[in-house]
Image (cartoon, helix red, strand yellow):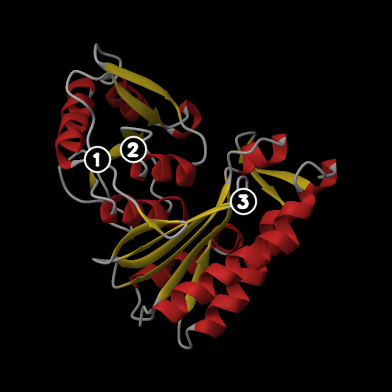
Amino acid sequence: MIDDELIAAVEGAIRRTVAEEVMPRWRQLADHEVVEKSGPHDLVTVADQRAEDQLSRTLATLLPGSVVVGEEAVHAKPVTYEALHGDAPVWIVDPIDGTRQFVRGHEGFCTLVALARYGEVLASWTYVPVPDTMATARHRGGALLDGEALFAGRPEEDKVLEVATSHPDFTTDAQKHALLGLRTEGVAPRPCGSAGVEYLNIARGLLDAVAFSWEAAWDHAAGLLLVSEAGGANSTLDAEPFRLAGGNALPFTAARDAGTARRMVGLLRAGS
């Protein structure tokens, strides 16, 4: 199902959609084109909606019999998310990951697409339009950034771990306590930006780990495969791999290597 032709076709579809629906609106949004969903840190714009619509039509055509789970479609009709439990191949789409950054005119946003079936992510695409870079990954097929192999490596000995964490608005009291476990010597936590960009930074060896407290598949599917195929690892609070369809012990972590992931889980448990 996943071949070079499909990888290239999806990449082309993403690039076209972003060029037509996203970038013309970057730093050009009118006030009425931005709407709060659940609060000031959860925004949707006309660019999100139009890009998801276009991608959804194109992706379904590229793989007949597939279905699409998109962030904005699920917001409008939550039952759509149940497709992750079905038998059909599922395209998981986040048209603009980092909408807050996009709305503010910042550069830290991306478009995420993943293809999954039976709870397993088979391929992923992470496109960062500024500065026009594309990362792809295939299950057991490696990860590439603009055609070059990605390898996350591991943090140097005695290096302070650089960690991106969930925004406090998206954490329960119990999760806040767990994240406090990262406020210790040898760890430098900071609030995360776009999840997709943070995952890409792990795969590139520019960030050591993340600790996230929400499960939305469109935020995590593409990045988790990218990190895994670059040699990284992920783990939930109960030391299990992240489950795409939900029900995970949170917060969970993704990291440059398995040892760092285990260390992160230990710190999160200590804070719980």
- Residues packed near mark 2 inside 10 Å, few (<14), some (14 to 19) or many (20 plus): many
Residue 146: % across, % down: 47, 57
Q: Quadrant of the N terminus?
A: bottom left
Q: Which residue is mark 2?
A: 205
Under tag 1, what secondary structure? loop
Q: Quadrant of the C terminus?
A: top left
Q: Quadrant of residue 81?
A: bottom left
Quarter assignment of residue 200: top left
Q: Residues within 10 Å of mark 1 (few under 14, many from 20)?
A: some
Q: Residues within 10 Å of mark 3 (few under 14, many from 20)?
A: some
- The amino acid sitting under disc 2 is Gly
| Residue 82 x, y percent position in the rendering | 41, 68
Is 13 on the left-hand or right-hand side of 237? right
Residue placed at 28% from the left, 39% from the top? 253
Q: Residue furthest bottom?
A: 64
Residue type highlighted by circle 3? Pro
Label 2 sits on a secondary structure element that is: loop
Using residue 255 as the reference point, say whether residue 49 is left or right of it.
right
Q: CA distance from mark 1 to mark 3?
A: 25 Å
Q: Is 249 placed above or below 53 here?
A: above
Disc nearer the start of the sequence (3/2): 3
| Residue 47: image tag | none
* Amino acid on which the number 1 mark rests in the picture: Gly
Whole-Å distance between the Cαs marked 1 and 2?
A: 6 Å
Q: Which of disc 3 and disc 1 is earlier in sequence?
A: 3
Using the numbered discs, state the Cα–Cα distance from disc 3 to disc 2 in whole angstroms.
20 Å
Residue that numbered label 3 is attached to: 129
Q: Nearer the viewer, residue 170 or 149?
A: 149
Find out whether the residues at labels 3 and 2 contact each other: C-beta distance under 8 Å: no
On the image, the x and y values in percent for residue 47 come to 72, 55
Badge number at residue 153: 1
* Residue 170 or residue 232, whichever sits in front: 232
